[in-house]
Image (spheres, coloured by chain):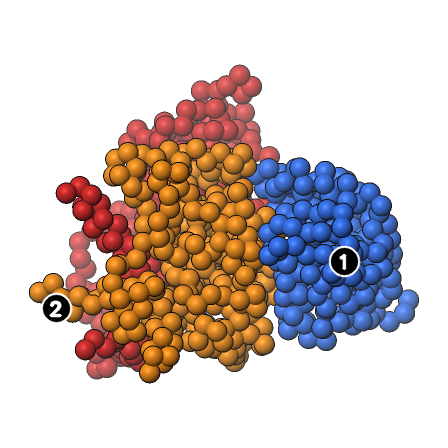
Chain colours: A blue, B orange, C red
Amino acid sequence: MSALQPGFADPVLDAQASFRAVLEAMSRPGRIIAITTPAPAPAPLNTAAAAVLLTLADAETPVCSDAGDAVAGWLGFHAGCPFTPAPDRARFVLATGAAPALTVLDAGTEEEPQTSATLIVQVEALAAGEGWRLTGPGIESEHRLRVYGLPEDFLSQWQAQRARFPRGVDVVLCAGDRLAALPRSVTIEEG
Amino acid sequence: MEAGYNFAYLDEATKRMIRRAILKAVAIPGHQIPFGAREMPLPYGWGTGGIQVTASIIGPADTLKVIDQGADDTTNAISIRRFFARVADVATTERTEDASIIQTRHRIPEAPLREDQILVYQVPMPEPLFRLEPRIAETKRMHALADYGLMHTKLYEDIARLGRIGTAYNYPVMVNERYLMSPSPIPAFDNPKMDRMPALQLFGAGREKRIYAVPPYTPVRSLDFEDHPFRAIRAPHACTLCNSTASYLDEVVTDDQGGRVYVCSDTDFCRTEQERAA
Amino acid sequence: MYVAVKGGEAAIDAAHAWLADARRGDAAVPELTTAQIEQQMTLAVDRVMAEGSCYDRGLAALALKQARGDGIEAAFLLRAYRTTLTRFGHAAPLDTAAMGITRRISATYKELPGGQVLGPTFDYTHRLLDFALAAEGVTRDAVPERAADEAAIPRVSELLAREGLMQREEAAEAEPSDLTREPLAFPADRSARLQNLARGDEGFLLGLGYSTQRGYGNAHPFVGEIRQGGVMVEFTPPELGFAIEIGEIDVTECQMVNQFHGSLTEPPQFTRGYGLVFGSGERKAMAMALVDRALRAAELGEDITAPAQDAEFVLYHSDNVEATGFVEHLKLPHYVDFQSELENIRAMRRNAV
């Protein structure tokens, strides 16, 4: 086995900076935010997804990952998170390949919608100012976002999920060192 | 920085737990998220929820402002500001425009907040229905069903009995037309500032162990009736110091002969107004 | 001309200096050491450990000294310290049958295996102020030696259970709740309730327990057994996979035996109310056992009619650190809210006229 890659250079302050990036993304759906404190994650994990998981996952949060043993070993060591093969039992679901259907993930309950999963999807690219039209909390009038590399039926999945609010899965889209978030409250329309 | 404690006092596992709660709170605007609030070195009821939220978001690049009753120099605001200067070594300010994080008890600053600012509220009772239904298990069910008839009935009874809604602070709001939310005990005067505010608003209730949020630009509507629209009340006077007729005023008793003056509760706003006039 | 008063910062510093001076008292009187508090104010130390939810006699003594003897303030200090410690996991259930007994009494049997041991109790002292204690240098009477009991002393509840008369409670497989990690949720399971009560305010639980004896809740309690003494704490580190002893603590355990008429699924039998606290805390352990049994009303199919049976009411109000914070926060400034109320009331009065 090759030597384990290190995690955040400064576990305290880098996690804080990454958290603020994710918080900004979640607060302003569709806005693209760059991670400024990258950790050298093993392939196929990209910088943004690595930062999100290092910042948020730990022993309390089962992770379901399709990223293979090297990533699991790295995350397990630095975040201390347990892994589960069952996507419906995971608090964080990491998709480096094809994103799973939203309906197979834990959407929480009507009384406790916050127990739902957060889906972290690695996508090919994110572009602002074009593509989907996003409206809802966090957005002054509308945000435009184009995502390259999501399943073709993602939009119809999203619309089906919107009908279940407050239940639902929150999504973080990660491309390279950049990320954008889709909290369950956002409405997405074809651009 | 204080030796022997982590940056911003909380250990990293606690911060992660609170950060996860904050993100879910942002994703479900107005919904109260239970969290494992820690015992802080300040008493419950004195801002421990706001302090835990601030401690979980704050970093070296931030500038912190702390207000209580709108003022930076009230003793509890000083105590909290000192706490963060001690455990996080962050820059602090009394100027609203210079702050990236503003922790507040009972007021929203008069100056409009910007996108690059976060407002953290200290919340004593996060449940807006608690006077009508003290059982948390029951109010959880009501929120799940968006069943807020109890609150409408209460406000309507106020009108029937008093001729107006009897709530002057902690005036209940609907967030994004889904969740009924306590704005914390801010005067109703401040409620309209919450509506579609460009800044992120985070709420922390330490003793009750709840976190909730209003994302930027989210509609926040104070409950009212068509024939009894919501009214923001302030004392009908001008500030003695800066002459503002728009700001929220504190009434200061100057003698025992009925002497009173009115001054801005937002001390930074008042100073800015005075500087502008000078 | 009105000038706003400034100087909150200086006022806080002055208050802290004054507090330190008041804590010390008359400099002509020797300063208390924490060792003296730990050795001679043992029950105060025990209560601070119990309500502070942290077993450390030295730190509890320090907290008492720093808090000028205020038990709730001391518990708060200890809690705020405790919360900064890393949590490694949870210990194995204490085996109180293997306790090194310093006191053990049963009200349900005159004679029983292991006998009755009064121990260092106030019970049969006449409450007459002992002025000899006010004089310094009191000589100590020799304490009669007690033969060390090597054999474990069986618990009274076990004697009843063997006969099928006491409801058996199965060990739960699930990890016990930890209120310091996860907030209360309802219905709260027994482990969450017991943890809450064990940390709860003694006075609050005493009043509630007392109320169950006066008809508020249908209690018919007997003290099956109270025992005090040292028990080993065992912990299984995940990397070892087997239990190791990490220390010994003193605890007080109370098992109340209560009548139960039976239900469709359960025959008539006795049921248990359980109390366990750090140190010597007999009053608290007994009150806790009464309240624990009252809180089992729902699971035993009994009518919930009294405050002590109302889990939300009891569990949300038992914590004195939370309670004192919220009660005392009323002295913080509320003039912004009060101003709103003033304007509102003035407007209503104008309308009324």
Residue B127 screen position, x and y as percent: 44, 45
Q: Secondary structure at mark 1?
A: strand
Give the side of residue A63 with respect to residue C345, left or right.
right
Taking B52 as reference, is C159 above or below it? above
Mark 1 neighbour density, 10 Å: few (under 14) some (14–19) many (20 or more): few
The answer to whether any part of residue A117 appears in the image is no
Chain of the residue where label 2 is placed in the rendered structure: B
Chain of the residue where label 1 is placed in the rendered structure: A
Nearer-the-camera pick, C283 or A42:
A42
At 40% from the left edge and 65% from the top edge, which residue is drawn?
A: B110
Numbered label attached to residue A172: none
Q: Quadrant of residue C334?
A: bottom left
Give the side of residue B267 with respect to residue A107, left or right.
left
Taking C336 as reference, is C195 above or below it? above
Give the side of residue C23 with respect to residue C280, left or right.
left
Residue beneath disc 2 = B255
Residue C147 screen position, x and y as percent: 45, 52
At 40% from the left edge and 68% from the top edge, which residue is drawn?
A: B67
At 59% from the left edge and 48% from the top edge, which residue is drawn?
A: B28
Taking A78 as reference, is C17 above or below it? below
Nearer-the-camera pick, C351 or C277:
C351
Residue depth check, mark 1 versus mark 2: number of the one nearer the observer: 1
Residue A172 screen position, x and y as percent: 73, 56
Mark 1 vs mark 2, CA separation in Å: 64 Å
Residue type of the residue flagged with mark 2:
Asp
Residue type of the residue flagged with mark 1:
Glu
Numbered label attached to residue A130: 1
The answer to whether any part of residue B153 appears in the image is yes
Q: Tell me the quarter of the image containing the C terminus of chain C.
A: top left
